[in-house]
Image: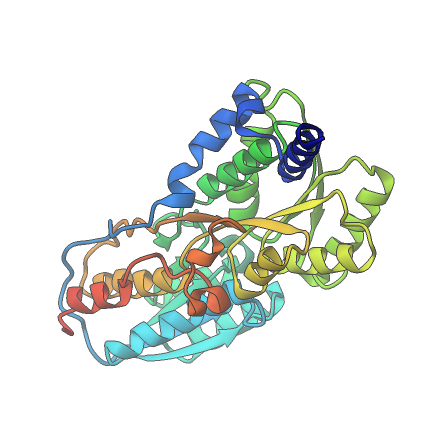
Amino acid sequence: MRRGLAGLLMCAAAALFCAGGARAEDLSPQAQAAKDSLQALMNEKATWHGPTSAPKPVTGKRVAVIACCQAAEGSSRPANAIAEAGKLLGWTVDIFDGKGDPAEQSKAFNAAIDAKYDAIALDFVDTPVVADAVKRALDAKIQLITLGDMKNTPDTIPDVSHDYVGTGRAIANYMIWKSNGKINAFLLKNTDLYEIEHGQYLGTNEVLSDPSKCPDCKMTVKPWTFAVIDTQPAALAAAAVQADPSTNWVWCFDACMSRVSRSLKAAGLGENVRGAGFDCNGENNQLIRDGVIQVVCACDPREWEGYALIDNLNRMFNGQPAVAQNIPIRLFDKDNINQLTDYEFNHGWQGDYDFKTAYKKLWGLM
């Protein structure tokens, strides 16, 4: 009798264990390789690989920040950090809200040009989208720099970015690992931002479409725009899950994922679906901790990038070229999200390093 009870308990424990995903010994070679590729991003804290010297800060500069959308944490976090860092150098920094609308972004950009700022920083505003204003600013000899654009037109405009393609690959490998390579993914690809299509999406698609890495992966891709972020991504995801109940992953970045996760949960459509996202803003971290659809996010320290932009802008004011800032990335799920401090959980990962002190020392402020 005891032996029978013990056997039942062992079976129950095994069943509970397996409910969370395949056991390590049951992983396919591809899933094991995907898991192995993520260990550093999930378990090792980032370190400083930024510049080791900087020119003396210039003084009295006026800088305008054209933010993609201040209502979105992914945009407001770096914009606010740019303002904070610039003020440390004694600069006047003003933020213009592009409201997620290319017309508003162009309007704000042109207003900054008319106001004769010394420099203009584009925060997730792609240069081709505001091409006329870019030309006006360059003709007026205003210093231009971007954050999160990856590639600018013209390419002489420097950019501060992390490895967007790398985060896309990491998310794909996580999906392969946790589903043991059995993936039917619904990807919501935003068409407004270059770094989505040529960064996050490129990295994920590169891995999931490779038969050697995921022979049983299936993807459906749907485009959407910022203008309909409050309605379309969630509606598209719900329709996809209803049309194909075998859909087991939905993919998109922070603000999109939070809307999709809550909508699917409210509609009772999330039983077999997991959310894979980016940026690890406070709302996304809470979804992961609470188990509300989203289970993972790949992220960068947005405030660090804001300080890095100011560092490069100061170099430009000194007649020097911008330098590689080597922004780190990490991956968080329910197993390591408690490594975040309370502040990071609510406001986003800060990079595992006191980057503010590092930049202050570079600038001779400490």
Q: Is residue 122 above or below residue 204?
A: below
Q: Is residue 85 above or below residue 226?
A: below
Which one is nearer the viewer's eye here, 191 or 302? 302
Quarter of the image holding residue 248? top right
Residue drawn at x 33%, y 57% is: 352
Residue drawn at x 39%, y 68% is: 120
Quarter of the image holding residue 340? bottom left
Q: Is residue 191 above or below residue 289?
A: above
Residue 279, horizontal then vertical, whole percent:
51, 55
Position of residue 272 in the picture relative to residue 226 (left or right): right
Position of residue 66 in the picture relative to residue 326 (left or right): right
Does residue 62 appear in the picture of this structure? yes
Which one is nearer the viewer's eye here, 360 or 341? 341
Position of residue 131 in the picture relative to residue 13 (left or right): left
Question: In the rendered image, which quarter contains the C terminus?
Answer: bottom left
Does residue 67 appear in the picture of this structure? no
Residue drawn at x 27%, y 67% is: 356
Residue 207, horizontal then vertical, whole percent:
54, 29
Residue 98, horizontal then vertical, whole percent:
56, 70
**Residue at the extreme right of the image, as rendered:** 243
Q: How many marks?
A: 0
**Residue at the extreme front of the image, as rendered:** 1
Residue 53, horizontal then vertical, whole percent:
14, 57
